[in-house]
Image (cartoon, rainbow, N blue to C red):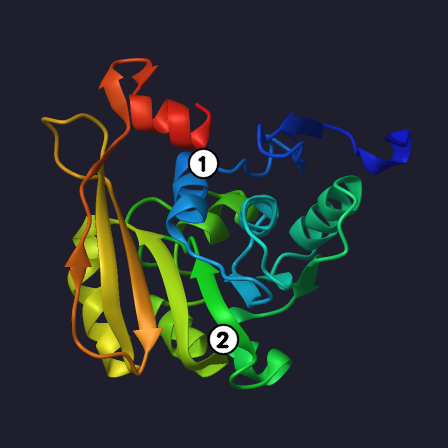
Amino acid sequence: MKETELRDGERIDDLQRNGRVIIQDPSRFCFGIDAVILSGFARVKANERVIDLGSGNGIIPILLEAKNRGGSYTGLEIQEENVEMATRSARLNGTDDIHFVCGDICRAQEIFGRGSFHVVVSNPPYMKSDSGEINPKSALALARHEISMSLEDLIRESAALLRENGRCYYVHRPQRLGDIIYLMRKMRLEPKRMRLVYPFVDREPVLVLIEGRKNGNPELRIEKPLILYDAPGKYSMEMRDDYGF
């Protein structure tokens, strides 16, 4: 790799998946386990067009491209610095199937057009703008709080971008599940699959993975729980075997 690919404070991380790597800057934001498990929960068929809303440093499109045979992967991200970094990561991986666009999720259908994608994925901010302490570093604040968009904005734009029977995949906090299902049905994205993620087998869930289908029939399948750890500091067998931890 050329030295010019890296900026001050950046590093290259091996994603342990088909040789893919990603550029990250720890002073801004590094991807978490939620993005990784969302990439495993989402299903992408051959030649499908995929968009990641709020793509951050590009981790989800890069992982999806490594795991699937989709036709193209687009990341929409409002922070120009993240788009530039993610674009360098895509170039570093030598793929022409991943592209990043700088823009506002609230205007996604204006940018790309209605019905432009088969699949929408998103690892959105979990916290409402008026809840919790907001990080003074804007990159982290936008990643964690609904500052630039709300949950309703995300689901509305997902529905507009999807083709008929297209699929959306989200990872979020279980505490917001009522809001998520209500808004998905309001926007005619019928919940079809759901999986709860637990830190340990005897703890409460910390994440929820959910799939919706545009104008789908009502039928929600609850999958077996995903347990992250067998013991403190020891990932579960599923996490080791399926996700490489």
Q: Quadrant of residue 191?
A: bottom left
Foreground: 166 or 104?
A: 166
Tell me the quarter of the image containing the C terminus: top left
Is residue 45 positioned above or below 201 on the image? Answer: below
Q: Residue at x 89, y 35 (%)?
A: 4
Residue 143 in view, yes or no: yes
Q: Which residue is mark 1?
A: 32
Residue 210 pos. (x, y %)? 28, 57
Is residue 153 positioned above or below 180 on the image? Answer: below
Q: Amino acid at mark 2?
A: Cys
Tell me the quarter of the image containing the N terminus: top right
Residue 148 in view, yes or no: no
Q: Residue at x 63, y 80 (%)?
A: 111
Q: Nearer the viewer, mark 2 or mark 1?
A: 1
The alpha-carbon separation of the residues under discs 2 and 1 comes to 24 Å
Residue 229 pos. (x, y %)? 26, 22
Q: Circle 2: is it few (<14), some (14-19), or many (20+) Cα within 10 Å?
A: some
Q: Which residue is mark 2?
A: 106
| Horizontal relation, residue 43 to residue 187: left or right | right
| Horizontal relation, residue 45 to residue 6: left or right | left
Residue 53 pos. (x, y %)? 51, 63
Q: Amino acid at mark 1?
A: Gly
Give the mark nearer the N terminus: 2 vs 1: 1
Res. 215 mark: none
Q: Quadrant of residue 165?
A: bottom left
Is residue 35 positioned above or below 6 on the image? Answer: below
Q: Residue at x 44, y 67 (%)?
A: 149
Residue 122 pos. (x, y %)? 44, 58
Q: Of all residues shown, which one is farthest toward the front? A: 46
